[in-house]
Amino acid sequence: MWPEGIHEELSAAGVRVVGYVPDAGHKRLIELCQADKKMRAVVLTTEEEGIGLAAGAWLGGQKSVLLMQSSGVGNVINVLGMVRECRFPLVTLVTMRGEQGEFNPWQVPMGQAVRPVLEAMGTVVQTPAGAEDIVPTVNAALRLAYNSYASVAVLIPQRVIGIKSFQDQSAR
Amino acid sequence: MKRRDAVKRLLAGRKNLLVVAGLGSTAWDVTAAGDSPLTFPMWGAMGQAAMMGLGLALAQPKRRVLVITGDGEALMGMGALATIGVQQPQNLTVVVIDNERYGETGMQTTHTAHGVDLAAVARGCGIKQSKVVTTMVGVRALRAAIHAKKGPLFAQVKVVAEKLPLVLPPHDGVLLKERFRAALADVLPKKL
C-alpha cells in the first residue's frame, strides 16, 4: 500500500522530523511515522507551524516532511515566503479534498485553489497519476527538494484516498 | 528595564548557543548585542520563531537553543507553545521581550497590554518552567538557566516601550541560512 511505500521512502531518504496535522487520508502514514524510532512525529495545531519546524530542522541539519490535508495549504501561504526567500528544502504531502467526488461543499474552494496558491508561492506541485505512482512521486519529490533546495508538494488525489462520505470518513 | 540591556545580558558569553530571533525589534536587539552566524534573525514569517526554535532543538539535541522574540510575534503563533509543550524539548528556551507594543507598525498596543498573560499561556500549554521577568537580576538568572537548566523554558521579559535606532542584521535569506549551517558544519552528519 502507498502509505507503507511513502514511509519507506522517507526512511531511506533520512527524514527525521515529521510535522503533521491529522487527516483521515494520512492516518496510516502518521501511525507508521509515530512507530518509527528514528523519526520524531510532531503534531501541530496548524499547518503553518510545520513550515517553521521544517526550516528549523534544516538549519540544524535534519530532513523533514510535512503532512497535511488540502485545507491546510491555505494556512501556510505567507510563511512559504520564507521558504522561497531562504531556499529551504521542503517536502509537503497533501491529501486532497474538494476534488473528485467531494461530499462536503466547504472543502471545494480551498481544494480547487491548492495548486495555484502553492505555485504562486514558488512551490513545485506534483500530482501522481494514480495509486501506483504515489511512491515514485514522493521519491522524486524528496530528491528534488533536498538536492535542489526546492519546495515541493505532492498532491495525493482524492480518488486514490477514496473517502466518499462523512460516515465513510469517521469509520476509518 | 530596557530591551537592549536585557537581550545583551541574555547573549553574554553565548559560546555555542543557537539563536533564532523573531522579526522586528528582537532581530535588531540581537544584532545590537553582536551579530553571529549562529543567529538566525527573521525578516518575515511572523509567528514562526518559536517553531523554528523547536525544529532546531530537535535536530540539535546536544546544543542549547534560544528563541528571542516579541510579544506581537509570539501572539501570532501562540499554538507553537502547545506544540512545544507536547514535545518537551529539554534544550529549548523561548524568551518573549514584551513591551506590550507592535514596535514596527506605530507602537500600537498588543494583547499583553490588555491582560493577556503569555507566561500563563505557556504554563497552560505544558511548559512548566515559565515565568515573568521584570528585573536585570532576573535576566541574569534566566541567562544561567538557558545554559544549564533542563527545558523547555519560557520567560516573558517585561521591558519599557521605546523607539530605538535600527541595528539591522544581513537580510538575504540564503546567506542567513547558509552561514548558520556552515557554522554548525563541524557537528553535522557527514552524509547530507
Image (spheres, rainbow, N blue to C red):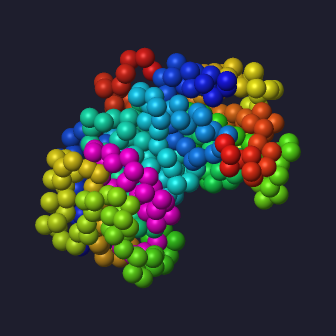
| Residue shown at 28% from the left, 44% from the top | B91
Q: Quadrant of residue A140?
A: top right
* Viewer can see residue B115: yes
- Range of residues picked out in magenta: B73-102
- The percent position of residue B149, horizontal first and vertical second, equals 18, 49
Quadrant of the image containing the N terminus of chain B: bottom left
Task: Please tell me which residue lies in front, B88 or B116.
Answer: B88
Q: Residue furthest bottom?
A: B114
In-image side of B100 versus B1 (left or right): right
In this image, B125 relative to A115: left or right?
A: left
- Is residue B83 shown in magenta? yes
Residue B120, compared with residue A41, is above or below; it is: below
B182 over B111 or under it: above or below: above
Q: Is residue A87 visible?
A: no
Measured as percent of width and height from the top left, residue A26 is found at 63, 38
Against A56, residue B10 (above or below) is below
Left or right position of A97 against A138? right
Task: Determine the image quadrant of residue B29.
Answer: bottom left
Residue visible at 44% across and 52% down in the picture: B83
Is A97 within the magenta? Answer: no
Residue B5: where, in percent of width, then height? 23, 64
The residue lying at 36 percent from left, 25 percent from top is B188
Q: How many marks?
A: 0
Quarter of the image where the C terminus of chain B is located: top left
Q: Position of residue A38 (x, y in %)?
A: 41, 27
Residue at image coords 74%, 46%: A168
